[in-house]
Image (cartoon, rainbow, N blue to C red):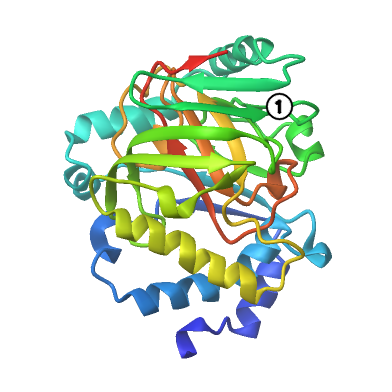
Amino acid sequence: EILEITPLHYLKLIENIDAYIVVEPYEDPGVLGNAPREKLNAKIKFNAPIKDILYGGKAEYAPGKKWCYAGWPSRKAAKYYNIEYDLLEKFIVGGMSVPQNKMDEITKDLGKSFENTKDVHVTDDLGTDFTVTIQDRPMILDNGLLSDDRIAVGLLGGNLPAGEVFFPPHEKIGEGTLFCPLTRDKMTNKIIKNTHLRFKEGKLLIDEITSEENQSYLINTFKDSEKIDREKNLPELRTYNVAELGIGCNPEITKAIGYILTDEKINGSVHLAFGSNKMMGGTSVSQLHWDFVTAPQANIT
């Protein structure tokens, strides 16, 4: 219970900052893997009031603070993701080093394909087949810069490496299945493999999720996040609603490793997130925002 309490002086500090920058905090992503679940839940509850301030989750804190989350490679992380360090460095540092004018050109060219689009249908040969609606929703070109257009929709920050075009789709519309070959549990960082996620009317069907490895961690994180959202007495529970449709386009990132920060930027991949999206022009508030990435070369119509 003590771990759940956010000190008032800490909240006041966050209230009075202009911006915050985070460089990947975990040298070893596996450090949380064996932590007691109740303590990890306490950590989320501790962070909840902080996230309200940072992302404008409550009206009195809107629109939030400017922010940046930057990845950084380590040899322990490379071992955890079961890849060579040089490849992890290529994805993160190389992904950040794409010339800004080139990334700007790539995202603008990709964005043109979605102008005046109502519905987006995504398929692949591994089981992905879903449709979401983006009509009249903002299109965000993630070229590594915090532009006036991003600020106008309420998105005050971004990740590095950059490299995607994304939308907050209509949260109660859309259905189908997404196959995610590799992801990382948002709470424990456990690697989760070969997951099928089915949703209907924009809402994830939690009881129909299947994964080949660590499925229980995925489901428990969703359910634990739901509990926290319910405790906050939000106008509407949105833990399970579609929150983001993104298309990766960073030319330096070519393979899923389980690190969502780079996986969602894979050139030719598509990702769908569930949970919060108010910070990008949507209508959902939640403690959770979880991206699930398809295999590369998904088909988009």
Position of the C terminus, as image quadrant, is top right
Query: Residue at left 53%, top 41%?
Result: 199
18 in relation to 151, above or below: below
Query: Residue at left 38%, top 78%?
Result: 39
Left-right relation of 161 to 121? left
Q: Is residue 144 visible?
A: yes
Q: Secondary structure at mark 1?
A: loop
Q: Is residue 249 visible?
A: no
Left-right relation of 180 to 121? left
Q: Position of residue 211 (x, y in %)?
A: 30, 46
Q: Nearer the viewer, residue 85 or 211?
A: 211
Q: Residues within 10 Å of mark 1 (few under 14, many from 20)?
A: many
Q: Position of residue 93 (x, y in %)?
A: 37, 31
Left-right relation of 29 to 103? left
Identify residue type, mark 1.
Met
Tally of numbered discs: 1
Query: Residue at left 47%, top 40%?
Result: 198
92 in relation to 20, above or below: above
Query: Residue at left 44%, top 23%?
Result: 269
Q: Position of residue 129 (x, y in %)?
A: 47, 25
Q: Nearer the viewer, residue 122 or 199?
A: 199
Q: Nearer the viewer, residue 136 or 99?
A: 136
73 in relation to 106, above or below: below
Left-right relation of 68 to 217? right
Q: Which residue is mark 1?
A: 139
